[in-house]
Amino acid sequence: MQLKTLMGTRFRENPSHVKFRSQLETAISSVTPGARVDPATVEGMLSLVRSKEVSPGDALSCFKTYFREGKPDEQYNTLRVLIQFVDTDPHLANMLHMELATRRWRERFVALAGSPHPEVWPLLVATLQTWAASYRAHDIGMQYQGTLRELNSGGASFKPAGPGYNPQYTGYSMQQTGYSTQPTGAGFPIPPPPPGYPMHAPIGYPAPAPGYPPYGTPPPPQSLPQSAARRPQENVPQKLEQLVSELEVLRGAIRTFETTLTDYKAQSCTFAALSAAMDKGQRSADRCSTLQTQLESLMGTSDTDEALTARVFSTNDAVVAALEQWSHLANQELAPDDAPATSTAAVASSSAAGPSTSAVPGPFTAPPPPRPPPSPLDLL
């Protein structure tokens, strides 16, 4: 498959994105059954993301294009490359999973489950189960569980061919026969009723009680619990601005603590001032850490564009660096320097020993005036 027919023109001029897409195409075309994807090719793709030449969202968008427009074999090979790409680097995996747990990727996984390739469904389900178990204590795991529930609720719409399911392929689009594609309100497609099935209550059937739906009405779709409901995107920029503001406060507290610590070691300020500066910095560091966790949780339950996602990642890196700097400062030795202390001790010991002739100077005496030059009379 030619890259120009797959990828948009947004990053066509960027050499880094062209290089990433070329490496991805090489990895997909080199997949062999029963063998791992070429580690060197995957490592080259990861290095472009580590160096921030390609953002995680842009990298995953390349995979999404193959899932959407690729042939069945290419979809399966792309899924294998994606799994190895995500699982190779644990540090980058966190950022990649934050993107993969969004609604856009949930829809892409649901669409990929309908691939005609017989190995896509079991591999996709097993992978999502593994990822959900890895993040079971995190909101990302909840999102993967929601994707699995949505896949399983589709019933035969996504499962491999079997009795009662007869898929027909036209090119690379799949047409399902025997199942209704119209929304029924039940949350997933169900087979239509057989011919002659009564759509209304039979004669003599008692009327429904007040407040109950009429006969034959399908059950309403189950609403998501409040904790799993998608939050609006506006919460992410708001929380991000709070984190940026608190980050500036933390940086100011770090500068103040550095100055106060230097003065304290030089014995030019009290320990109370140093303790106050440390308390202020620690409170700011705690708030930054809390906001960072809240923002990470929002990113897993909100739909954000690529620009906002890139800004979140950049701010997160700055927060991590500031927290590490504060931790290093707060764990320093707080004792004063030895030189001023030794000098003070020497002065104290000399005072206690009493006055001495060498240490105590005598009374001040004005020097004698200079003698005038000799006169002619003095020379006679």
Image: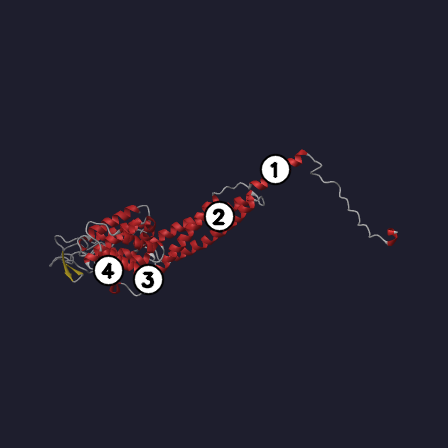
Secondary structure beneath label 3: helix
Q: Residues within 10 Å of mark 4 (few under 14, many from 20)?
A: some
| Residue type for callout 4 | Arg
Q: Which residue is mark 2?
A: 281
Q: CA distance from mark 3 to mark 1?
A: 67 Å
Instruction: Give yes or no for contact between labels 1 and 2 (Cβ–Cβ under 8 Å).
Output: no
Secondary structure beneath label 4: helix
Q: Residues within 10 Å of mark 3 (few under 14, many from 20)?
A: few
Q: Residues within 10 Å of mark 2 (few under 14, many from 20)?
A: many
- 1 or 2: tag closer to the N-terminus: 2
Q: Which residue is mark 1?
A: 345
User: In which quarter of the view is residue 178 placed?
Assistant: bottom left
| Residue type for callout 1 | Ala
Q: Is residue 326 visible?
A: yes
> Closer to the observer: label 1 or label 4?
1
Left or right: 348 with respect to 368?
left
| Residue type for callout 3 | Pro
> Closer to the observer: label 2 or label 3?
3
Residue at 28% across / 59% down in the picture? Answer: 21
Residue at 49% across / 49% down in the picture? Answer: 254
> Closer to the observer: label 3 or label 4?
3
User: In which quarter of the view is residue 337 placed?
Assistant: top right
Q: Which residue is mark 3?
A: 15
- 1 or 4: tag closer to the N-terminus: 4
- 2 or 3: tag closer to the N-terminus: 3
Viewer-proximal residue among 342 and 10? 342
Left or right: 42 with respect to 290?
left
Residue 314 at what x, y percent from top left?
Answer: 39, 55
